[in-house]
Image (tube, grey):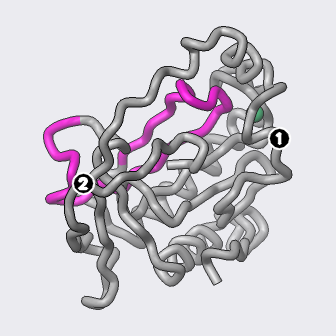
Amino acid sequence: MHPACAVPVAIIRPPVQIRQAGLLLSPAHTFSMEVIPGVPQPAWNNRKRWANLLDGTRCPLCREVGPPDLIAETTSAWVTAPKSAPLPGYVCVIAKRHVVEPFELPAPERAAFWEDAMTAARALSGLLRPVKMNYEVHGNTIPHLHLHLFPRFRGDPYEGGPIDPRRASFHRSPLQIRRIRDALADASPRGGRRSIARHRSRDAK
Ligand SMILES: [Zn+2]
């Protein structure tokens, strides 16, 4: 989950170790998970703040030069991978242009955004070999177009229901994030680092 979408983390039971088949190439690559309580208020309940988020004047993604936790960039989108996420292989694909709904993107940018997003999804799938890739577009907290990519695995905390980032958080090591970043960089349909450029975030060194 993008940090701005996240809710405060609180540990209510000791962290447990969960391994995701396909991602973990050695026993050292395990993830600690915390259970997160709390129900955040919808952003739209504050009408003034919501209006400012919609028009971009208070959009946290537009106020920064680029989003935090950036691991890849295309002409249409940023891809982020925070250290903590609802699932081990989670990334977020964020449109560079501030639009609330996907259909608001001009047609060429809309096509480029989805093509880049699917390139990222394919790369994640190849790296992690999830049992299923999940795709979520909400924007209820930050109404700036972004697509959550959730590689699902057997035994994950959300089996039988929707992904709920309030329920669990997986902590990814710099090495694990770097492997995701490299997979995205290698996935360029033009065979190089030009479509999805390599980025070195502080956390991925
Ligand atoms: Zn924005």
Q: Which residue is located at x 61 percent, y 41 percent?
A: 114
**Which one is closest to the eye, mark 1 or mark 2?**
2
Q: Amino acid at mark 2?
A: Ile
Which quadrant of the structure image shows residue 20? bottom left
Spot occupied by residue 6 in the image (x, y as percentages of width and height) = 50, 44
* In-front residue for pair 22/178: 178
Q: Which mark is residue 204?
A: none
| The magenta stretch spans residue 155 | yes
Q: Which residues are magenta?
A: 134-161
- Cβ of mark 1 under 8 A from ligand 1: yes
* 42 on left or right of 38: right
- On the question of residue 39 being in view, the answer is yes
Position of residue 60 relative to residue 90, above or below, is: above
Front-most of residues 73 and 163: 163
Q: Which residue is mark 1?
A: 63
In this picture, residue 17 sits left or right of residue 172:
left
